[in-house]
Image (cartoon, rainbow, N blue to C red):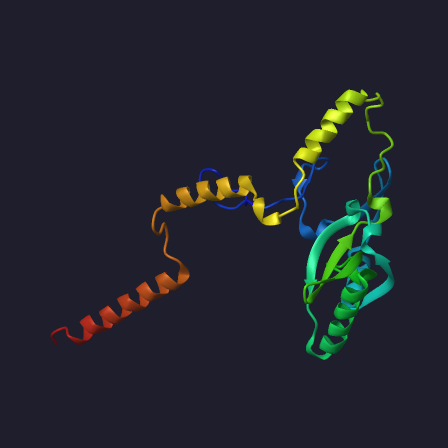
Amino acid sequence: MRFRYLHASCRTPLTVQRYCPVHEVVVPEEEVVRGYEVAPDEYVVVERAEAVAAETALARSRRIDIQAFVDQGEIDPIFYDASYYAEPRPEGRPAYALLQQAMGRVGRVAIARLALRARERLAAIRSYGDALLVQTLFYADELRPLTGLALPAEAVPPRELRTAIRLIEGLAEPFAAQRYSDEYHRRLMSLIEEKAERLPAAAEEGPASRLLSELQASLEAIHSARHEPA
């Protein structure tokens, strides 16, 4: 669920402006550059043309380069990011079907590189029903290490551990995704629908409605002019 930020007094969607606190001005788009921080308050600027050239070269590549085939169980779930269905072009349907069925037989997933939203991504591709499922992966250096976390080091008493294990086993059951739903989303949508029903039917005519009204007024004016007495 995504919200738009509105001006409370008029319900107009707000725009994002880039503000420079040094010059105390809103910076126009043509004066914005990309910078990578290499040290505190020290940046290397990547020119717009350089960034566009790199993105364009990557976007033109529609290849999915398979690097290896691995057992799915070897991929720790922490590496998974987002999932997409892959759909073949007409000329690629035979190869798609061959790969999907072969991977389904051997039970392995492909580790591949692909361009997605102007960025090279690592992905795991596996057979899912009659389709290929592409699951983007985080690179290893994108994961936060456990070092530095304030984790408990105390030993757990054996009796408490046994009690906790019995509790876990007592609640164990097969996973059924359909049993779970987003309660926050459901309650919020219910509230939105309730509020939407109380909105005025039409606060303002849209362009099409205004045009129709204007045409109707013009026709009535012409009709009146033609029937005025000479």
Task: Give residue 191's quadrant in the image.
Answer: top left
Residue at horizontal 54%, vertical 40%? 183
Q: Nearer the viewer, residue 151 or 29?
A: 151
Q: Quadrant of the C terminus?
A: bottom left
Q: Nearer the viewer, residue 9 or 160?
A: 160
Q: Position of residue 142 (x, y in %)?
A: 82, 45
Q: In this image, 64 relative to 200: left or right?
A: right
| Location of residue 83 with respect to 40 vertically, above or below | below
Q: Position of residue 225 (x, y in %)?
A: 19, 73
The answer to whether residue 155 is seen in the rendering is yes
- Extreme residue in the left direction: 229
Residue at horizontal 54%, vertical 43%? 185
| Location of residue 143 with respect to 70 vertically, above or below | above
Q: Position of residue 30 (x, y in %)?
A: 70, 53
- Extreme residue in the bottom direction: 91
Q: In this image, 72 relative to 7: left or right?
A: right
Q: Nearer the viewer, residue 53 or 101?
A: 101
Q: In this image, 184 relative to 122: left or right?
A: left
Numbered label tally: 0
Task: Give residue 169's quadrant in the image.
Answer: top right
Residue at horizontal 65%, vertical 46%? 175
The answer to whether residue 120 is seen in the rendering is no
Q: Position of residue 156 (x, y in %)?
A: 81, 22
Residue at horizontal 82%, vertical 26%? 151
Task: Give residue 107's quadrant in the image.
Answer: bottom right
